[in-house]
Image: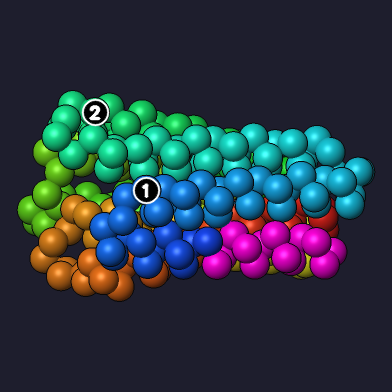
């Protein structure tokens, strides 16, 4: 697994480089670093499938989710290349977020396939938690998004909640095996990165420093993706 850890380390280092270039407003360098990080976590999945051929169906599912994440990453970086065209920014931002959302759904479906919610139905009670927190921020006017988009974000965060609860169910159904904890760690980091990104961009009252936020958002996201890839080896 030395190869996996080398590729995973490259992914995390690239994510830190992306954060650095983000703070320096170096659009092209930021795009290159983000692309390298995304390609790296995809290769982590491919390598894990190669090392554990018995995991092929699970691994391909994870790889598909990672591919959606990579496409979303690329689209969300392209908007910076067209500062004079706000319609391009809107297109790339909307399309990128949609593709990203599809990746979240894939993770949620995968987790509930491998850890049926019928085995842990009580977890469904926790699904509204994240959306309710977001709704509270919307109703108190702390979110700067238009109301329509704000309510669309409720659906997005309901799926994020589903991913976390699917991971908890995965831990329970795997009876405490390492793969369950790896998936749970990945899901929590993924959700944290998403939530922090949303608060940074749309909740200015929190006054999150733009010099610090990139060093939190991208590395936690990339570590999460590498952990999802690592779970293929242990499944």
Q: Is residue 203 left or right of residue 29?
A: left
**Callout 2 secondary element:** helix
Give the residue displayed 28% in from the left and 39% down from the top.
81
Q: Secondary structure at mark 1?
A: helix
Specify the color scheme.
rainbow
Residue sitting nearer the eye, 24 or 97: 24
Check disc 1 and report the residue beneath it.
28
Q: Which image quadrant: the N terminus? A: bottom right
Residue 168 visible at all = no
Query: Is residue 10 inside the magenta stretch?
Result: yes
In the picture shown, does residue 233 fall above or below 101? below
State which quadrant residue 63 falls in: top right
Q: Position of residue 109 (x, y in %)?
A: 61, 36
Image: magenta residue range: 1-13
Residue 99 appears at what percent x and percent y? 45, 32
Measure the C-alpha gap from mark 2 to mark 1.
Answer: 17 Å
Q: Which residue is drawn at the image coordinates 76% and 44% (left, top)?
A: 46
In-front residue for pair 233/34: 34
Query: Considering only vertical position in the picture, is 223 above or below 94?
Result: below
Q: Quadrant of residue 98?
A: top left
Which residue extends farthest left?
141
User: Horizontal and vertical percent for residue 217?
Assistant: 39, 62
- Say which residue appears at 35% left-offset and 37% top-offset: 78
| Label 1 Cα crowd, 10 Å radius (few <14 / some 14-19 / many 20+) | some
The total number of labels drawn is 2
Give the residue pinned by disc 2: 88
Residue drawn at x 77%, y 40% is: 58
């Amino acid at each position: 697994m030395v190869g996996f850890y080398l590729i995973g380390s490259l992914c995390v280092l690239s994510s830190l480089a992306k954060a650095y270039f983000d703070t320096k407003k170096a659009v092209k360098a930021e795009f290159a670093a983000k692309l390298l990080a995304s390609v790296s976590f995809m290769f982590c999945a491919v390598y894990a499938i190669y090392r554990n051929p018995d995991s092929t169906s699970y691994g391909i599912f994870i790889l598909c989710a990672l591919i959606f994440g990579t496409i979303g990453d690329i689209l969300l970086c392209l908007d910076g290349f067209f500062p004079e065209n706000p319609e391009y920014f809107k297109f790339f931002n909307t399309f990128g977020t949609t593709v990203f959302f599809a990746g979240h759904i894939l993770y949620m479906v995968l987790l509930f396939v491998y850890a049926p919610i019928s085995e842990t139905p009580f977890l469904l009670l926790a699904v509204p938690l994240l959306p309710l927190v977001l709704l509270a921020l919307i109703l108190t006017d702390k979110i700067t998004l238009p109301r329509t988009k704000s309510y669309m974000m409720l659906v997005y965060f309901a799926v994020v909640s589903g991913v976390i609860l699917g991971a908890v169910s995965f831990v329970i159904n795997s009876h405490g095996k390492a793969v369950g904890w790896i998936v749970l760690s990945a899901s929590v980091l993924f959700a944290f990165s998403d939530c922090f990104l949303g608060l940074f961009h749309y909740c200015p009252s929190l006054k999150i420093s733009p010099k610090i936020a990139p060093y939190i958002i991208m590395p936690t996201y990339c570590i999460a993706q590498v952990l999802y890839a690592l779970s293929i080896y242990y499944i």
